[in-house]
Image: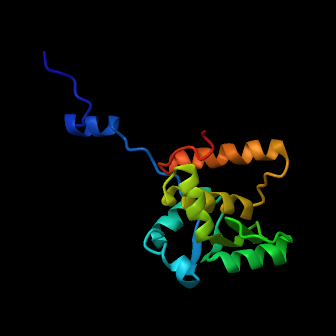
Amino acid sequence: MPLARSGRSARSARSARSVRPVRPVRPALGLSLQFAGADAAADRGLLARHKVARWIRAALERPGEITVRIVGTDEARALNRDYRAKDHATNVLTFDYSHAPLVTADLVLCAPVLRREASQAGVTLEAHYAHLLVHGTLHAQGHDHEVPSQARVMEARETELMLALGFADPYAV
């Protein structure tokens, strides 16, 4: 008795079973990447444009126009003092201008502070930059961590994104 056939070859039947997962579509991103001064320029090799774009896109929930500026201690301190009334350099400052329909923001990261924090935490500088770019991008969309319940939600999202990007949980002790 002849075998019944479906009309597909064995090869096409196998390929139908091994369907590749579809990558999620990431929102469009207009990115300006700036390095201000020698302190910031030292990290230029670590922060290739395609990496920075990948890390930011992972956290974007809608299309965005984002400027990333890597600065030294003096500029970070002046911005933190002028806009937040805190007279010290901080790791990341987010200046968000709109959340929808287009996320527009400036993210300012202080290279010397990031280097110190990464060393103290025992993480790579690349992982720390990725984390703070994800963190700043979430802030640019209205996420916050001033209230404990908001902090738990934001940190859980950051952890999820960092793991998806191939990094460790930034909040694991």
Observer-nearest residue: 112 or 19?
A: 112
Quadrant in the picture for residue 71? bottom right
Q: Position of residue 145 (x, y in %)?
A: 79, 51
Observer-nearest residue: 148 or 90?
A: 90
What is the tally of numbered marks visible in this picture? Answer: 0
Q: Position of residue 32 (x, y in %)?
A: 58, 79
Identify the residue at horizontal 69%, vertical 79% (top origin): 74
Horizontal arrangement in the rendering, residue 120 relative to residue 17 (left or right): right
Q: Quadrant of the N terminus?
A: top left
> Where 10 sits versus 102, above or below?
above
Farthest bottom residue? 37
Residue 26 visible in the picture: no
Horizontal arrangement in the rendering, residue 137 relative to residue 121 (left or right): right
> Where 22 sits versus 116, above or below?
above
Identify the residue at horizontal 58%, vertical 49% (top origin): 161
Horizontal arrangement in the rendering, residue 90 relative to residue 57 (left or right): right
Q: Quadrant of the C terminus?
A: top right
Q: Position of residue 85 (x, y in %)?
A: 86, 71
Observer-nearest residue: 65 or 171?
A: 171
> Where 25 sits versus 22, above or below?
below
Quadrant in the picture for residue 144? bottom right
Residue 106 visible in the picture: yes
> Where 6 sits versus 149, above or below?
above
Observer-nearest residue: 102 or 40?
A: 40
Identify the residue at horizontal 76%, vertical 55% (top origin): 143
Identify the residue at horizontal 58%, vertical 68% (top origin): 28
